[in-house]
Image (cartoon, rainbow, N blue to C red):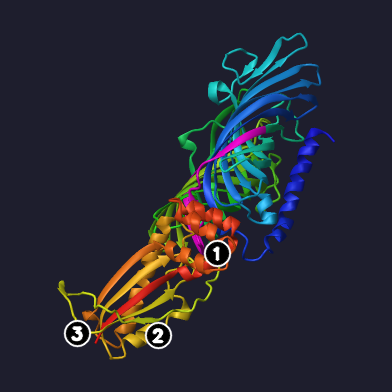
Amino acid sequence: MNKFTFSKTLLIIILAMIPFSFFGQEGGGSAKPTRADFKSYLYFTGDFGLGMPSANNFDQKFKPNGHIGMGWQFDNIVGLKGKIGYGALGADLADANTMKLDYIESSLSLTMSLTDIIFGYNPNRLVNFVPHIGIGQLQYRQQFEDQNGNVIRQVGYDNNDPINERGGGILFRKVVFTIPMGAELNFRLGQHWGIYLDYTASRVDSRTLDGKIDGDKRDWFTSFNLGAVYKLNNASKRDSAKYNSWFLTLDGGASWLYGDNTKSLDDVKGDLNIGVGYFFGNCWSVYAKLGYGILEGAQVWQDNVIFEVLYSDYYAANINLSLDLINCIFGYKENRLFGLSPHIGFGQIQYRTKCLVGDEYLMFGYDNDSENNLKGDGMYNRRVVATVPMGIELTYRFRKNMDIYADYTVNWTNTDILDGRASGSCYDYFNTANVGLRYKFNKKCEPVVEVEPVEPIIQYVQPETPEPIIIRDTVVIEKTHVYYNAYTDAFFGVGDSQIHKDYRNLPIVEKAADGSAQIREVVVNGYASPEGPAELNLQLSENRANAAADYMKQELSKEVNITEIDFVVEGKGADWEGFIQAVKESNIEGRDEIVSTLNSTTEREDALREIMAKYPQVRKLFPQLRRAGITITSVK
């Protein structure tokens, strides 16, 4: 088995394992850590290794390469990483000549932990298998030498020698598009450090990386690298609820061709698209689009003959996956105004092109039988090619259900004659820059887990010494009256600020408003379970306190005049004291260690994450902490 066959076999095995791996999500019970326990983080990488070309009819040589990079792990499965690198490739050609090449590389890849998909989330796991795929660019220069070491040809060098073919990159290097794909085997050494082994096969949008044009296949190069990774402190916990909705889009703007033609503003034309999609999991969306566009190309020279793309139009259809970076990094907020979303997809275009070569017309994909027309297999004999649209979108929410967005997309096509000219060096692509509107249907909130019912507690306490009461900003100490404090809890679902349906008919309301005493004050304190970020818990506790206060006002107003009642409403944030007390009263193994750990640290969030990994049964205590405490003070 040669090296190129091995590369393809490895990738096929990785892709074939993915559908079956989802069977590993079930099992283990609720005591296991879940994805909701994961905190996203930023990391940096560096690696060094060997690479070789995989192309036509020569013996490959291993040459060194290295990379530095950084990435963001969104959850325990999905991440995004970018890297830049420098390397060399070499080979002995079939004609006894030698090829030498060095390159500058950059790429952006999507990573996926196959181990977590199969076996579930485990923060203490030492080894992870992580496939990845992405997009990138290679800027290279190459030199060909004969058996005597004489230079016979150069590509991408910074000189005007007749044997040199300049490119359009840094210092006139040749620039090609790449699709890197492969897998990493990661080993965790500690809280911050790890090492990894990486194998990557990069598909190159060129048949001349090896210096030889071959119409059978595009060239590849592969690399085997050993690297180190450093993880920064955990940044934010995953949201506790997922907000899903359908949406419709309409956009239009500019389109322009990027093939062998020269580029000019005069050749910028237009396009129009409609789409439908679905938001899921706060960060992700998948959408399909249909569109129509027009392309033109400026004059270029081909064998001293004027070559011009007079007109080209296309129908486009594609499906895309989009990732909202703002929500993934900073957490979901319903009132956030801006979003930034890279996207990638696959699709097809059906196009026709009319060119002028000297005094002769050349056509592709037209519905006629002219000898100068090359028909296709699409609608009305249009040419059909596959596309890979990739780009980025900036979104602004100006109404609850309406967004306006600006989108830039590069559409890579699986053809070298979109511009009507077969140069043999690279595939063509076209770009679009659009402005559009998105209409979002009503969102649906799906809690990650169900709230566990907790029995409400009602207490009536008669103080031995009456407390001072503030009435209309005047302190009056009543020594002849008896005061009653009635207390209960209203409970909430995970990440929710609506009172749970089982606790909307609170007995405290009926008891306090029975006419036997006059209500003076209602104190409502909101709380959240402590597993989330402090800022989120504080906001959530305030929302719960306000929701409970509004409910009390609504119910009490049916029986009494609430204008004479003082309402004190406050969000207390995470109920750490309630959690510690619940641990003390539980039968959880290691409860003394848990209480001691939480009482001796100021970094309780990080400590709790380690506690949940070691004692996952503490999660059963969280539902009783998602509450609002209500105290009604009455006097006779």
The x and y percentages for residue 154 are: 65, 17
Earlier in the chain: of badge 2 and badge 1, it is 2
Q: Please, what is the three-letter code of the amino acid marked with disc 2? A: Pro
Q: Name the residue: 76% across, 42% down.
A: 10
Which amino acid type is shown beneath numbered disc 1? Arg
Image check: 583 left or right of 24?
left
In the rendered view, would you say 311 is above or below 20?
A: above
Categorize mark 3 by other alpha carbons within 10 Å: few (<14), some (14-19), many (20+). few
User: Which image quadrant for residue 506?
Assistant: bottom left
Question: Going by the picture, which residue comes out furthest to the front?
Answer: 464
Q: Give the range drawn in magenta.
A: 226-255
Res 618 seen here: yes
Residue marked by disc 3: 480
Q: What element carries label 1?
A: helix
Vertical order, 283 against 385 (above or below)? below
On the image, the x and y values in percent for residue 246 come to: 52, 64
* Residue topped by disc 1: 619
Please give left or right for residue 586 compared with residue 334 in the image.
right
SS state under label 3: loop
Secondary structure mainly formed by the magenta segment: strand
Q: Using residue 338 as the reference point, say whether residue 217 is left or right of it.
A: right
Q: Which residue appears at 68% of the width and 37% of the height?
A: 198
Would you name the residue on which mark 2 appears?
A: 507
* Nearest to the observer: residue 60 or residue 239: 239
Asked whether the viewer can see residue 105, the reply is no
- Front-most of 241 and 54? 241
- Quarter the N terminus occupies: top right
User: Is 231 in the magenta?
Assistant: yes
For the residue pair 292 and 216, the one nearer the viewer reads as 216
Look at the image and say whether residue 609 sits in the magenta stretch.
no
User: What's the distance in space between the residues labelled 2 and 1, CA to CA?
Assistant: 28 Å
Q: How far apart are marks 2 and 3 (CA)?
A: 28 Å
